[in-house]
Image: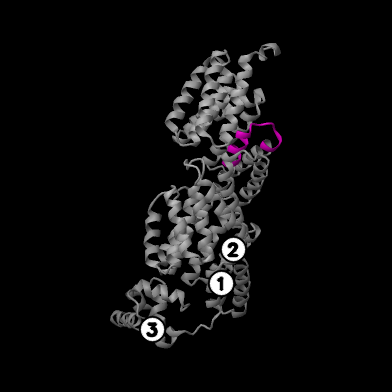
Amino acid sequence: MDAESRETPTFARLDDLERDATAAYLSGNEAESEALWERAHAESLRAGDPQRAGRAAFWLVLDLFTRGERARGSGWLARALRSLESVQESAAFGLLSVLASRQHLLQGEIDAAELAAHRAAELARRFGDADLMIFSGLALAQLQARRGRFADAAALFDEIMVAVTVDDVSPIAVGVVCCAVIDGCYLLFDFDRARAWTSALLRWAATQPNATMFRGKCLVHHVETLRLSGEWPDALVEAERACEYSVAYRNPFKYPAGAAFYELGELYRLRGNLPQAEAAYRRANEYGQLPEPGLVLLQLAQGHPEVAANAVHRLMSERQSNASRATILRAAVEILIATGDVATARMAADELARLAEPYYAPASRALAAEASGAVCLAEGNVPTALAHLRESWTLWQELGAPYEAARVRVLLAQACRQAGDAAAAELELETARSVFDRLGAGPDVKRVDALRQPRRDSADQVLTPRELQVIDLVAKGKTNRAIAEELSISERTVDRHVSNILLKLELPSRSAATAYAYRHHLL
């Protein structure tokens, strides 16, 4: 098409429509953006330019999919693909192939998704279209992750983000792809990459004051990064901003109010503001975000260990994505050990180790090693516990995650104490307390202070040496028969000891006695 014909009113009007549609999309005006893309599509067809019509349809369908309107999006996608049947060798057809790949992937049709993604990538190379390059790369990266080729997916994520920063791509493409890549990094447990690309997204967003469309997602990712990095005061401010911003918009698919409130709840819980944390988790649930595992950990912190344990058992019986499952299993280990169900905690830790094994990112190994170390410690296997916990601490340190590393230091201190090395235990606790104090992690500071107190307490004074032996074995999940065999006494005698323990400590059940033993360091 020559330069003279491009100056006709038809093409000038199309340029204006596309520019206005992009501006409406970036500013969050969904209805106006949708109407403008529909007009751009229709007028492009009337002007005899199906490729331009196909590109307008791509942005429209992308928006519909992002808003969760899959039925309408699928209808528009089918219509746009038909309009390009005569010009399949085009960048516009490649963009629509990216959306077709995404649709196949959501339906579990992996081979069809891969075929469409490779078709899009081939057209991107042939026509050198910058938008198609990054969208086809994203589709291929998501397929690699789905097939379990996690390192390959991460390499593609890096390549895509470099292209976003140096190539001339649409501002819509920048925002959509950056958010998708960061989400992908979290799904791969690659917290370090997520942190790096979140910084890149924030720098871009600062240059786009009118791009309100991506601001809520940007803020949530920023909060996640700040929390992991130990910058909790800034994270709290940003979390409150993310909540205020996101609730101003109705569509949870585009403005993640639920995720914002969940992050706010996490920060309140970690800092010991339990009523505020509960309110934030409830708001997260209202906006479609599952409040676990934060809510069950809050229940444990509120002094309701059995409620938390029941919730954990329910969650373990349900299905989650790998990333969500890992956080559930980690919380399960903590709660089940606290309530004395060490056998089930072992099952959770073993599942977490199997889940983390295929992943290359250090965070996955850190989570698994921490859980395994905590369970080994509860089982009395101190040498193995120390090995796992040292590995976890090293990995969290390398990731620049001070709170996570300090949590592991507390477990290391308990392991050192069980090994008879009181000096090493005190050193670990002192260092951990310093980190918790700097972060404002009030509950953890109190826990460390309790651990640093002399071991004798009221239970030592009211229970006999034999009863202390029995409560130790009860807390380790032993049955009365197993306790009787280990102590060479009758089951009836064990039953009497358990009854006396419950009476003296004013506890209602064996599980309550187990929680008491862990809480008061009687093991």
| Element at label 2 | helix
Question: Distance from label 1 to label 2 (Cα)?
Answer: 12 Å
> Can the viewer see residue 222 in this picture?
yes
How many other residues sit within 10 Å of disc 1, few (<14), some (14-19) or many (≥20)?
Answer: many
In the rendered image of this protein, does residue 161 appear above or below residue 42? below
Task: Decide which of tag 3 and tag 2 comes sooner along the chain.
Answer: 2
| Element at label 3 | helix
Whether the magenta-drawn stretch holds residue 176 is answered as yes
Residue contact between numbered discs 3 and 2, judged by CB atoms under 8 Å: no
Magenta segment boundaries in residue numbering: 164-180
Q: Give the residue at mark 1.
A: 445
Task: Decide which of tag 1 and tag 2 comes sooner along the chain.
Answer: 2
Q: Give the residue at mark 3.
A: 467
279 or 472, nearer to the observer: 279
The location of residue 496, given as percent across then percent down, is 30, 82
Task: Decide which of tag 1 and tag 3 comes sooner along the chain.
Answer: 1
Residue at the (47%, 32%) spot, across then down? 104
Q: Give the residue at mark 2.
A: 403
In this rendering, the label closer to the viewer, 3 or 2: 2
Question: Distance from label 1 to label 3 (Cα)?
Answer: 30 Å
The location of residue 243, given as percent across then percent down, is 52, 51
Residue at the (46%, 74%) spot, across then down? 519
Q: Residue flagged by tag 1: what amino acid is it?
A: Val
The location of residue 300, given as percent across then percent down, is 43, 66
